[in-house]
Image (tube, rainbow, N blue to C red):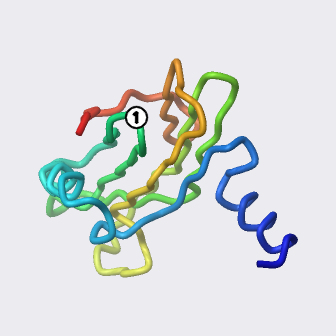
Amino acid sequence: MNKLLLLFILILTGCNTGLVFSEVSMTNIPSDMQKSIESAKTENGCYLFTDEGKDMYAFLNGGNVIPGEEAAFFTDVKIEQHEDTLNIYFTENKTSEYSNEKLKHQLLYKITPHDSYEKIQLFRNGEPIPFDIVFGI
């Protein structure tokens, strides 16, 4: 592979600190992780799944829409390492356009950490928030 292309890919995936992350399909993950994520789909929220120190998965779920209320969708996901802290940033928006297929009401990111982290912080619209649930598989 061309070295310049490889460098570009590493920068896009956040690997400049050894951290690798990418959006993944819910069908392209290990079956035990898939079962856990399927159970989390019933409630909207922000979830973190860990796979015994190997990979982590951040799941943003806004797919459960209450009739008459606006639906959540997600954009601008960034995952960064800052010293011993992993920061996950995203923007949550609301819409009444339930049928717009371009909007992402559920996002799943696979995170392959380079180091172990003292803290993992989650930021919605620039504000720190807790994860709704953290699962260990």
Q: Residue furthest top?
A: 118
Q: Residue furthest front?
A: 1
Q: Residues within 10 Å of mark 1 (few under 14, many from 20)?
A: few
Residue depicted at 42% across the width and 66% down the height: 24
Quadrant position of residue 68: bottom left
Left or right: residue 118 versus residue 13 is left
What residue is drawn where x is 34% and y is 61%?
A: 106
Q: Which residue is mark 1?
A: 53
Residue drawn at (81%, 63%) of the image: 7
Q: Residue at x 36, y 81 (%)?
A: 101
Q: Quick check: 94 left or right of 19?
A: left
123, 83: nearer the viewer: 83
- Quick check: can you spot residue 64? no
- The amino acid beneath tag 1 is Gly
- For this orientation, the residue located farthest to the right is 4
Image quadrant for the C terminus? top left
In percent of width and height, residue 10 lies at 72, 60
- Nearer to me, 45 or 114: 114
Quadrant of res 86: top right
Q: Reply above or below: 131 against 27.
A: above
